[in-house]
Amino acid sequence: MAIELYSQREIEKIKRASKVVAEVLALVAENVKPGVSTWELEMIARREAQKRNATPAFLGYKPPFSDKSYPAALCISINDEVVHGLPKKEKIIKEGDVVSIDFGAILDGYAGDSALTVIAGKGSPTAQKLLEATKEALYRAIEKATPGRKIGDITHAIHETATSYGFKTILRYGGHGVGRKVHQEPFVPNNPKDVGKKNPRLRQGMVIAIEPMLAVGTEETVEDGDGWTVKTKDGSLAAHFEHTVAITRKGPVILTEL
Ligand code: MF3
Ligand code: CO
């Protein structure tokens, strides 16, 4: 499948879905506290999406990288968990936990996708630095999302930021096209080893989710026993930030900002 290009009108629709995503994520993030279960956060996301007449994009969705449907609205990935952490009643957030929350919503046939990481209570200096680096990687990457540049320019911005802090970029996971579906082409790698020969050029009308995933100690991941949760291979901390971004004539436009 070719990379889909969106008209200004369609980008407005993706923006409306993305606004719901931003609002729901902010509300969920406010509720990340020691003692709260990740399932309680899941319930908040479902309720708040419904209030806004939006459908959670991940709930019941079969992503391209799996042969089964994802059973929740949120991905909540804690500490050494990188992405796709499954919310569970028995999973209770503790003081100092590094909590990544990822949410997608569909409104009027268009999707938005965003993620952020927060620390429950007071985090370690390393945790704080990791969050700062991952957020900086996202914003440096967004600056590269202009017509004429290449997907690999986004990857390199993420990787250089990570390296400048002494952190790693996760292999084999990354961003993606988003709009009429939550996962579309192109793949947007976080690690330069994943930039292929194709390395598509960015064009006006593309909409992509840019989602740096950084870890303290390794690029490598392993899948947890639940069939979804992806963890760092060495057990080191990971963080994740994501925005849906439109590539326009005037440059990058972040759609999932409040
Ligand atoms: N935002 C996540 C991603 O782009 C979505 C995970 S899809 C799920 O990787 F179905 F696994 F939740
Ligand atoms: Co995404």
Image: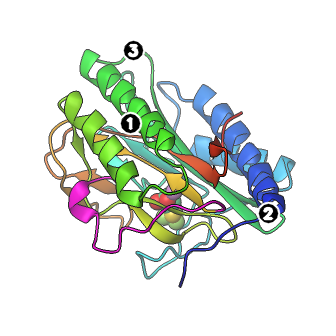
SS at circle 3? loop
Q: CA distance from mark 3 to mark 2?
A: 41 Å
Q: Position of residue 94 (x, y in %)?
A: 39, 27
- The residue under the point 60% across, 41% down is 41
- As shown in the figure, which amino acid type bears the numbered disc 3? Lys
In the image, residue 114 sits, relative to residue 99, either above or below, namely below
Which residue is depicted at the point 43% across and 35% down?
Answer: 140
Residue type pointed to by label 1: Ala
Instruction: Answer yes or no: is residue 189 visible.
Output: no
Q: Residues within 10 Å of mark 2 (few under 14, many from 20)?
A: some
Q: Which residues, given as a range, are shown in magenta?
A: 189-205
Quarter of the image holding residue 193? bottom left
Q: Nearer the viewer, residue 39 or 96?
A: 96
Residue that carries the numbered disc 1 in the rendered image:
137
- Tag on residue 122? 3
**The magenta stretch spans residue 206:** no
Q: Which residue is mark 2?
A: 10
Mark 3 vs mark 2: in front: 2
Q: Rounded to the nearest whole Å, what is the CA distance between mark 1 and mark 2?
A: 27 Å
